[in-house]
Image (cartoon, rainbow, N blue to C red):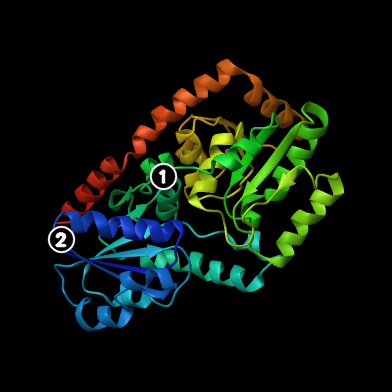
Amino acid sequence: MRVHQICARLQFGDAVTGQVLRIHETVSSWGWESHIYATARDEHMVPYDDGLKAYRKGGMRERDDILIYHLSVFDENHKLYLDSRNRKVLIYHNITPPEFLAPYDPHLAEVCRRGRELIPRLRGCDLALGDSEYNRMELVEAGFAAEKTGVLPIFVDTASLGGDYNRALYEELRDGRVNLLFVGRMVPNKRVEDLIDLFAVYNRRVNAFSRLLLVGTTWSVAYNAEMARRIRKYGMQGAISIPGWSWGVSDEDLRAYYRAADVFVTCSMHEGFCVPLLEAMHFEVPILARAEAAVPFTLGGAGMTFREMDIPLLAEATGELASNAGLREALAAKGLKRLEDFDPALTAETLRQYLEGMG
């Protein structure tokens, strides 16, 4: 069996890239031939990319081969998917609705708009998979036959989270303050500004001896300015930090942030999956999350959720999550149980059933 994967970009640390590589490793472990082709790549990914020209020359004409096309943004490489004679699998990672991005980056908003408009044109496949039930439902809404859709979760390597951590950083953070943690890119759909609003009220009215850790890379100058303006408005410069704002943080530092966290909080309005929720479960950190997009499907009841930004109420809920030992233990147990559903061995078996079931 020969499997081809096409994606827009191979980038170190990117969630879609991680899924592409795990599928490559998994099918290779079965003794299948596996190839990856990307429109763009960073220097770390050069060894994995066979190049789109190689697919045009020797891959796309064989009906017995399987093509897995990863849709996460508009890319002209979709024409290869449309023209390919391979058996086709579409994996939809979701595309950010352009209205979130338009005020800050009109060009990227246009790319996302074109990507979302492309979805119905890709219906001519043998199988369409979302990496969450939310994404699968979007495919059905776009006209894909429900019986030809399914869910293939993100391969989450929780075993790697048990590695060494920055002990000096951990000790620095365990200074008695309550640590509220967010992990993810600082992008408008994640509504980091709402989280800053929430923390300001929590810090002023519930627990002044607290800090907010926004761990992840920032995105645009304009959005960075909006976050900075809010932080200054509330006078929270000493209580809110954005470590790794430019290049991200090391794995050792990330593990230290999770270990030191008292509550994981996200006000995100749009997620296709949200891997940090599972990472928080692994570290037994209670979760407060906005119940939008894929978040409820990923959480599976293993966290406290909300829909409305009732900030005073949410500040009190955050305080309860930080201090109520019984509640924390109950949510930690639910989180560990939920993690079992994302065991990489189960995901690999799901993938094999899908591919072998294509005939």
Q: Residue at (36%, 46%) from the top-left corner?
A: 153
The percent coordinates of residue 120 (x first, y second) are 42, 64
In the picture, residue 358 is in which quadrant? Answer: bottom left
In the picture, residue 247 is in which quadrant? Answer: bottom right
Residue 211 drawn above or below residue 324: below
Q: Residue at (45%, 25%) from the top-left corner?
A: 334
In the foreground, 96 or 139? 96
Q: Few, some or many C-alpha atoms within 10 Å of disc 2 (few <14, some 14-19, many ≥20)?
A: few
Residue 319 drawn above or below residue 129: above
Distance between the alpha carbons at the discs numbered 1 and 2: 28 Å
Residue 272 drawn above or below residue 106: above
Task: Note whether residue 46 is visible.
Answer: yes
Task: Note whether residue 310 is visible.
Answer: no
Residue wearing tag 2 = 32
Q: Quadrant of the C terminus?
A: bottom left
Q: Which mark is residue 86?
A: none
Which residue type carries mark 2? Trp
Label 2: element kind: loop
In the foreground, 114 or 172? 172
Residue 176 drawn above or below residue 324: below
The percent coordinates of residue 58 (x first, y second) are 19, 80
- In the image, farthest residue toward the top: 326
Image label count = 2
Which residue type carries mark 1? Glu
Q: Residue at (45%, 68%) from the top-left corner?
A: 118
- Is 304 left or right of 135, judged from the image as shown? right
Residue wearing tag 1 = 133
Q: Quadrant of the N terminus?
A: bottom left
